[in-house]
């Protein structure tokens, strides 16, 4: 028992490593605030293009989405980090994570939003267009608000995954929560900082999980 | 005397192998109320939807209030403000209040300020007898009230012609009257109207002209009394007697 507390819940180690772990927490929050909107933006662009329904746009789009959904994000990230310097681009880990997430998670958000747009009856667009709204205006004011509401649980669930995936940044030396915790671990020769990081992830994401369950229950009850 | 408000000539529409409109000519004069009747699948709705280009006609010409609707140089979004359309399934925006439904195009297309749009929107709701329902969402309104809000959404833009695509078909019988009442008052205010509907009683005492369509073409047209009492074609006679049996 004593040994377990010493290795995993060591108060002295927590106190000593806290500044390092805290810096990581801050970076994870920053990274999430960057990659979630980026992914949503990418997804929105894909979904709007997909709603155009022109074969010339559709087929390349489907290939794009399929590719990035099938491609492991970790591999994508390492490939960008290792490959871009050869193309003359020294972008650093943070930017590589942003690009990789834009590509990977954008494809997921795009599929969710596309399903949301498809769930809005065609009569809504027809009514809007018949009053003179342009296609983009009809999308913005009539279709998207309903589409987002219809797929809110899926959007939230994907966002949860995205925040968890920011831990991948540790592989390319982005000083986010996991990376910093491992730094602290190797400095102190003690795994306690990893436990601290795990608890932080849980405390950060558990409220979102609860909210998601409530939304899903409500959607289920609404049927 | 001005030319007709709606002037469609030689309209053809193909959906793949399906030939839905087979050379339809239709003119609607200012202040005229024209009823279009015919069996389902006869192309009535498609005809209406070709007039504001919700459907792209395969060939022919459509001129509404002097604007060539099929000319690629025509600003279709501007032209559509002049053509109100009411749908069978209302198609109100469920995430907005009645007033929000009515003011959206006023603000985003007609370029009115929020205050101007709300004043015009409330006036339009007043005209359909729903001034006290402005803050209700469609889910809180009956079918008849929803359809009246949909009419208000169109008339708020002061269109030159109103197209009605089976406006009462989705309503419970006891709610039909309120919608027809609004249509009657619109007609009395001088609105030009083109109505696809099977409300024969309304057609009889409100329509100037009834057009009978079958299999994508106009079979005959004339004053309601003539079409209903003494139709010239066998197909018209068969259709009328079928409808009146109900």
Image (tube, coloured by chain):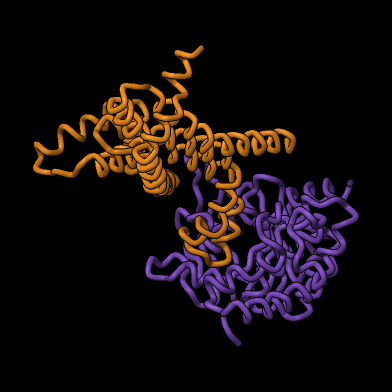
Chain colours: A orange, B purple
Q: Residue at x 52, y 77 (%)?
A: B111
How many marks overall? 0
Q: From the viewer's perspective, is residue B94 above or below residue B66?
A: above
Between B238 and B91, the residue placed more toward the observer is B91
Between B7 and B86, the residue placed more toward the observer is B86
Between A174 and A220, the residue placed more toward the observer is A174
Q: Quadrant of residue A73?
A: top left
Residue B40 in the image, given as x and y percentages of width and height: 69, 45
Q: From the viewer's perspective, is residue B107 above or below residue B45?
A: below
Left or right relative to A105: residue A211: right
Left or right relative to A113: residue B188: right
Question: Is residue A45 at all visible to an observer of this figure?
Answer: no
Q: Quadrant of residue A119?
A: top right
Left or right relative to B132: residue A87: left
Residue A215 in the image, given as x and y percentages of width and height: 65, 39
Q: Quadrant of the N terminus of chain B?
A: bottom right
Q: Residue at x 51, y 77 (%)?
A: B66
Question: Is residue B166 at all visible to an observer of this figure?
Answer: yes
Residue A93 in the image, given as x and y percentages of width and height: 23, 39
Q: Residue furthest bottom?
A: B1
Q: Residue at x 60, y 77 (%)?
A: B114
Q: Residue at x 77, y 50 (%)?
A: B170
Residue A188 in the image, given as x and y percentages of width and height: 31, 26
Left or right relative to A197: residue A168: left
Q: From the viewer's perspective, is residue A83 above or below residue B246?
A: above
């Amino acid at each position: 028992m004593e040994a377990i507390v010493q290795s995993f819940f060591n108060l002295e180690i927590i106190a000593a490593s806290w500044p390092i772990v805290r810096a990581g927490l801050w970076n994870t929050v920053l990274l999430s605030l960057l990659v979630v909107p980026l992914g949503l933006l990418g997804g929105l662009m894909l979904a709007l293009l997909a709603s155009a329904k022109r074969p010339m746009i559709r087929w390349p789009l489907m290939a794009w989405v399929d590719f990035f959904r099938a491609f492991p994000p970790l591999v994508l990230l390492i490939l960008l980090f290792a490959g871009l310097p050869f193309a003359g681009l020294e972008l650093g880990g943070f930017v590589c994570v942003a690009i990789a997430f834009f590509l990977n998670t954008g494809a997921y958000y795009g599929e969710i939003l596309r399903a949301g747009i498809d769930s809005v009856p065609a009569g809504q667009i027809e009514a809007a267009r018949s009053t003179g709204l342009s296609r983009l205006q009809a999308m913005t004011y009539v279709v998207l608000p309903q589409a987002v509401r219809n797929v809110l649980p899926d959007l939230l669930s994907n966002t949860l995954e995205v925040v968890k995936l920011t831990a991948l940044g540790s592989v390319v030396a982005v000083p986010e929560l996991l990376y910093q915790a491992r730094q602290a671990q190797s400095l102190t020769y003690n795994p306690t900082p990893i436990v601290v990081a795990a608890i932080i992830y849980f405390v950060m994401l558990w409220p979102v999980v609860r909210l998601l369950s409530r939304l899903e229950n409500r959607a289920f009850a609404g049927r | 005397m001005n030319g007709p408000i709606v002037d469609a000539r030689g309209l053809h529409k193909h959906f793949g192998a399906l030939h839905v409109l087979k050379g339809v000519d239709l003119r609607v004069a200012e202040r005229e109320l024209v009823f279009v009747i015919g069996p389902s699948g006869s192309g009535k709705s498609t005809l209406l939807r070709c007039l504001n280009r919700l459907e792209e006609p395969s060939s022919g010409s459509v001129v509404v209030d002097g604007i060539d609707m099929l000319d690629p140089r025509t600003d279709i979004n501007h032209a559509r403000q002049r053509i109100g359309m009411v749908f069978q399934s209302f198609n109100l925006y469920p995430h907005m209040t009645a007033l929000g439904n009515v003011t959206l195009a006023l603000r985003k297309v007609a370029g009115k300020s929020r205050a101007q749009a709300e004043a015009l929107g409330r006036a339009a709701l007043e005209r359909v007898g729903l001034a006290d329902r402005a803050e209700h969402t469609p889910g809180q309104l009956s079918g008849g009230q929803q359809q009246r809000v949909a009419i208000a959404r169109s008339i708020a833009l002061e269109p030159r012609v109103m197209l009605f695509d089976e406006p009462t078909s989705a309503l419970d019988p006891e709610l039909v009257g309120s919608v027809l009442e609004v249509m009657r008052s619109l007609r009395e205010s001088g609105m030009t109207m083109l109505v696809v509907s099977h409300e024969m009683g309304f057609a009889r005492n409100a329509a100037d002209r009834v057009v009978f369509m079958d299999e994508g073409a106009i079979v005959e047209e004339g004053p309601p009394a003539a079409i209903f009492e003494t139709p010239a074609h066998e197909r018209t006679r068969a259709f009328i007697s079928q409808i009146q049996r109900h």
